[in-house]
Amino acid sequence: MTKVTLITGDGIGPEIADATRRCVDATGAAIEWDVQLAGVDVMETAGTPLPEATLESVKANGIALKAPITTPVGTGFRSVNVHLRQLFNLYACVRPCKSYKGVRSKYDNIDLVVVRENTEDLYAGIEYEKGSKEVLELIDWLNAHSSRTIGPNAGISVKPISVEGTDRIVSFAFEYARKMGRKKVTSVHKANIMKFTDGLWLEVSREVAKRYPDIEFEDRIVDNMCMQLVQKPELYDVLVMPNLYGDILSDLCAGLVGGLGMSPGANIGEKGAIFEATHGSAPKYKGLNKVNPVALILSGVLMLRHLEMTDEADRLEHAIAAVIAEGKSVTYDMKPDRNDPTAVGTQEMADAIIAHIKAGR
Ligand code: NAD
């Protein structure tokens, strides 16, 4: 049995976690769940949204399936999601975007994977507030060392991109392509403008590509990449990019295949992997048995593939695809009219998926 931490989250988290657990179990996967709490609901009793027991469980098991967690605004608590990523150094964010028959979308032939670097770039959290002592010192230094002048009323965010960080994520993208039988990796950048950060990214990408002669390699400037994804998404396979472009393009790609309800994700590092839906905790739907569980169930598929439980992953994915294609036992957001009275609840959609798995259809 493989032990997996199941973090049930808050808001709609516990409902979709339960639906996902039941679907994964129906495949017969040899998984022992270690159920742990995190989020606003546990804060009152534990005094923290991320209890020590949850952290210890992720540390011990190395694999977690995580339902969404609310980031309360203005309470001083940092995002549990960001904290987990930093703590376990989950440097790769993987977001597959795939068309499923029956999902309303402008495209029907997309099968892309966005691999986003998770630790560097403008999201490294190195920022200096306008007017602060640090920013004024930094501006003085920059004005003395460049031909451009920055005025005293600027705030500054720093964009670190390193050889090691780039090598690690681009290698990850190639390894992922190999493991998943994919044919091409596209490195996305803005090297024509930011020569010492994105230029470095491109140079290292090209070096890494030489180690994988069996996988096609190309690069795209990020603005052109956006246009290409809208016009010819079928030309692309695995896309690897720095943190900021990855944040934006993974939502763009989710939009191509029907939105956040269809968008699973994984955060992977050397010490572990956390699988989660791209959407948040949608607190207004909490406890209503209404929302779509598919993004978290598809994250379960990614987890099964990561654990090399390929047969179980295939059966679960086929069952999800079949239920969506039938269009009968689906939640309100997948119906042509959101007020369609035939829409089913979260658990009933999971039941339909389980019935397909059991029938071996
Ligand atoms: P959200 O994704 O929770 O919800 C936005 C809207 O999307 C919802 O009102 C709903 O209409 C729709 N939606 C989301 N998930 C759905 C589903 N499964 N089925 C059907 N419709 C769905 O985004 P938000 O309102 O900006 O964020 C709510 C909270 O979630 C915030 O505190 C945010 O910080 C947090 N969040 C957590 C994660 C995470 O845990 N990884 C990710 C994003 C946001």
Image (cartoon, rainbow, N blue to C red):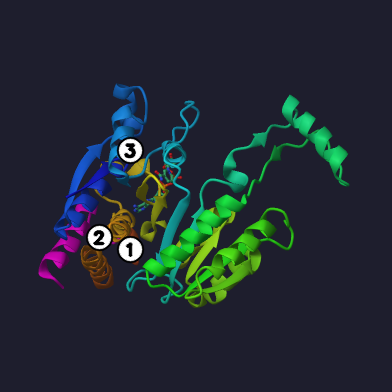
| Relative to 216, 292 lies left or right | left
Type of amino acid at the residue the image marks with label 3:
Lys
Q: Quick one: label 2, few (<14), some, or many (20+) residues within 10 Å?
A: many
| Relative to 135, 249 lies left or right | left
List the residue tagged with mark 1.
334
Q: Quick one: label 1, few (<14), some, or many (20+) residues within 10 Å?
A: many
Q: Which of marks 3 and 2 is in front?
A: 3
Of residue 106 and residue 61, the one placed in the foreground of this image is 61
Q: Residue at x 86, y 42 (%)?
A: 149
Sequence-earlier tag: 3 or 1:
3
| Relative to 28, 17 lies left or right | right
Q: Quick one: label 3, few (<14), some, or many (20+) residues within 10 Å?
A: some
Q: Is residue 291 above or below residue 177?
A: above
Mark 1: secondary structure: helix
Q: Can residue 135 be seen in this view?
A: yes
Q: In this view, does 140 lie above or below 111?
A: above
For the stretch drawn in magenta, the main secondary structure is helix
| Relative to 200, 348 lies left or right | left
Of residue 249 and residue 204, the one placed in the foreground of this image is 204
Of residue 85 and residue 290, the one placed in the foreground of this image is 85
Q: Which residue is drawn at 53% across and 45% down?
A: 119
Q: Is residue 47 magenta?
A: no
Residues marked 3 and 1 touching at CB (< 8 Å): no
x, y percent for residue 310:
25, 65
Mark 2: secondary structure: loop
- Spatial CA distance of label 3 from label 2 is 39 Å
Type of amino acid at the residue the image marks with label 1:
Met
Q: Nearer the viewer, mark 2 or mark 1?
A: 1
x, y percent for residue 292:
30, 55
List the residue tagged with mark 3.
59
List the residue tagged with mark 2.
343
The range drawn in magenta is 339-361
